[in-house]
Image (tube, rainbow, N blue to C red):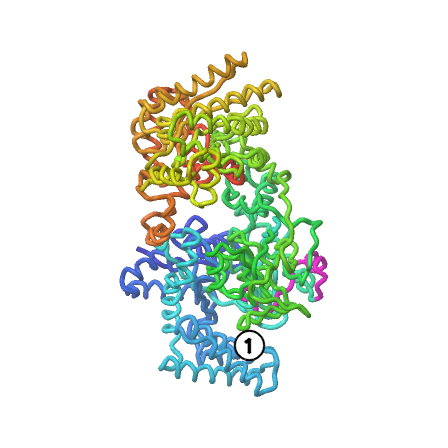
Amino acid sequence: TRYVFRFGGGVSDGGRGDRNLLGGKGANLAEMASIGLPVPPGFTISTEMCARYYEEGERFPDSLRDEVRDGLAHIEAVTGKRFGDPADPLLVSVRSGARVSMPGMMDTVLNLGLNDQTVEGLAATSGDERFAWDSYRRFVQMYADVVLGLDHDRFEEALEEAKEDRGYFLDTDMGADDWRQVVAAYKEIVEADWGKPFPQDVHDQLWGAVGAVFGSWQSERAKVYRRLNDIPGSWGTAVNVQAMVFGNMGDTSATGVAFTRDPSTGEHAYYGEWLVNAQGEDVVAGIRTPQYLTRAAREKAAAKPLSMEEAMPETYGELARVFDLLEQHYRDMQDIEFTVERGHLWMLQTRSGKRTASAALKIAVDMAEEGLISREEAVARVDAAALDQLLHPTLDPDAPRDVLTKGLPASPGAASGAVVFTADEAEKRAERDEAVILVRIETSPEDIHGMHAAKGILTARGGMTSHAAVVARGMGRPCVSGAGALAIDAKSKILRVRDRTLREGDIITIDGASGEVMAGAVATVQPELAGDFGTLMGWADEVRRLKVRTNAETPADCRTARRFGAEGIGLCRTEHMFFEAERITAVRSMILADTPQGRKAALARLLPEQRRDFAEIFEVMAGLPVTIRLLDPPLHEFLPTKDSDFAEVAAAMDVSVDKLKQRAGELHEFNPMLGHRGVRLGITYPEIYAMQARAIFEAAVDVAQRTGEAPIPEVMIPLVATRRELELMRAQVDKAAAAVFAETGRTLDYLVGTMIELPRAALMAGDIAGAADFFSFGTNDLTQTAIGISRDDAARFLQTYVEQGIFARDPFVSLDVEGVGQLIEIAAERGRGTKPGLKLGICGEHGGDPTSIAFCEQVGLDYVSASPYRVPIARLAAAQAAL
Ligand code: PEP
Ligand code: MG
């Protein structure tokens, strides 16, 4: 097997199709080189070596040494420099690059190849002694940190001390001799802390760095990132070794990062940041605040320092041409790193840029309208799950705001929450369901768990491409970065803004679209669903086959769902209607009655209430199918627990509290989820379902008469395991319908069907279908009963199951396709075997999960049903599944 692949200088051993083997960075470097863009020559050690490295106990096979030697020879041939040459040394960078980008999660070493001899050669060839020694001290520090694992602070302190001794304030005040002395001090620290002198052999340096990059694949922060982003540990990272180019060789040199379109808004304009006389890491790390790339952006922000467009018009023009070329070539928005070395432009990276959900939407729609991609591609490109971010409220423009300060609008959306200063505190409070805003001077990859736990992120330092901004956009968290007026004292847990002081726990609001930071919570408004959102949804609707319904039981939820495009109700859970304060006493009287007469009396009080519930829903859902499920939960969930409740029910029923308590005791169940619930209620207390069925038909007839539009009721029986159960209940429903039709002189169409949520029902679906007009898969209970994991208790151990890879994802969130999925396939096939036109749907939580929806498409269900806010996600996911 070959492990080393070259690029640059007219050679490309790989290309964009090789991302699995070469990692995203390596594949795209090879691709850029192959289309003639200026890429410093280098080579990629493949991800396969990463796997082998770990298999063989973190050692490299001997054959790799030969391959790396050839790779170095390639770089030497192209650059005309030699690695380790004291007169004119080749320096290289060593960077990680996995299949998918993991921003800031893994290690990088720059300026590798410097030692006490080569530094003199670099000084001579560059004609800049200060630059050479500055590069050397950067290298020693980075190498000590990344490869040797020494304490970063020791070096920072030594540097601060050196500046203080000289009365300097800035790094730029330091001269060649000053840096020479800092290098000497650094080398002493290495020898003291590591026990050996800093490695002078350039090949030792290289192997150390390659090992460190592979090693960083298993770092804690990389593991956390992979878990949050569903990235398998088996993928591994590649290592890219590439000739160094220098953005820090004076005022004709620069470095920058750019997006071909705005990653926050999606606007079709170059968007980026750059720094004159700096190395790449300076921009990303947020150490110096970078400048705007374009004149328009600078003017809009009323910033002083010149944009690259103004300061280096010629090179900028060249860069802009490369942007256009890359976007056309990749047919997607690109995220680009570049360096200008003494006026010469070099491309260091390109990749599809991470973007916010609203930018993804705009870019997809714009590109389709520009003719760069097709409408189907546009539909395929927007991450359905990320739409969630667009559907939630934004700050009410008319609400009063107590603005504390303004930073950069780094990731849109608004969030209010309690101020916390550490990632751990954020996580702790989030576990208690508290909304928090993580406030940091700047974030680092160590903060990732806290960023995930927080509702929003606020930093005092760093630009739009800082770690905080990039990660927040990826996670869909609102973020304001670089709010320079904030004085953060994390130790004392105090935040000062001018004359205001806030403490941990104080509520603030951030607006990631404007950059505003406000004291207190600010009111919000519903999002706009027209525009690009409406356009893309329209395209999605053209390609999808699956219908999308909603799970809703209040008129308000029904209205929200219709606004989001629901095509009916797939599940109306009637029990939620029984918990209302005015009704609960009647419900309890019904349950605790020990005779059918007692039950009937209580049910008579509930009938008009249920009729009103259904009429309201039928009106909102005019002309659409409405699936109403008859009562499902274990009766004991309705039992009183407080003495005052017992007293109230006793009075209503005219019995003693003691008698009532005794009756409640009799109803106690040890395993209520598998107990007296679902159709079992209908079988034992037929009056309940009879009342509900009557309420449904009375309401339907009433609405049909009043509005002229007949509703389409679909009456659904829960937790059926046998055909006989369904037959008995169906007879009840038909009887109620016939009675109501006779009384009112009006008939309408309706269906009677069942949920399939028990393994026996799935297996016996061929039989059950004989009595059903439709099946709706209740995958919450089906998952619970098929795997035998209690849906109410799973949270305690499922996380561990997911971490250990027993389940790829929580099976209550994303359908266990290979296991539970089989039951669905069997039921669908056997059900349709009996009744070819049998209508099939899904109404468990999985109906709103994109991966599960793809499965539903594959099995050929007719519809999915999701909670109102997930309806647009389901529409898009259904379209993507159909493509
Ligand atoms: C189900 O079990 O999947 C379902 C939709 O019903 P519920 O969640 O109400 O049990
Ligand atoms: Mg259920």
x then y, percent, for residue 141: 47, 76
Q: Nearer the viewer, residue 569 or 439?
A: 569
Q: Quadrant of the N terminus?
A: bottom left
x then y, percent, for residue 374: 55, 37
Seen in the image, is 297 located left or right of residue 48? right
Magenta residue check for 289: yes
Q: Identity of the amino acid at label 1? A: Phe
The answer to whether residue 772 is seen in the rendering is yes
x then y, percent, for residue 356: 56, 50
Callout 1 crowding tier (Cα within 10 Å): few <14, some 14–19, many ≥20 = many
Magenta residue check for 273: no
Residue appearing at x 61%, y 73% in the figure: 250
Q: Secondary structure at mark 1?
A: helix
Which quadrant of the figure shows ligand 2?
top left
Vertical comparison of 33 with 608: above or below: below
Q: Quadrant of residue 676?
A: top left
Q: Nearer the viewer, residue 542 or 546?
A: 546
To which residue does mark 1 refer?
Answer: 131
Q: Which residues are magenta?
A: 284-304
Q: Quadrant of residue 483?
A: bottom right
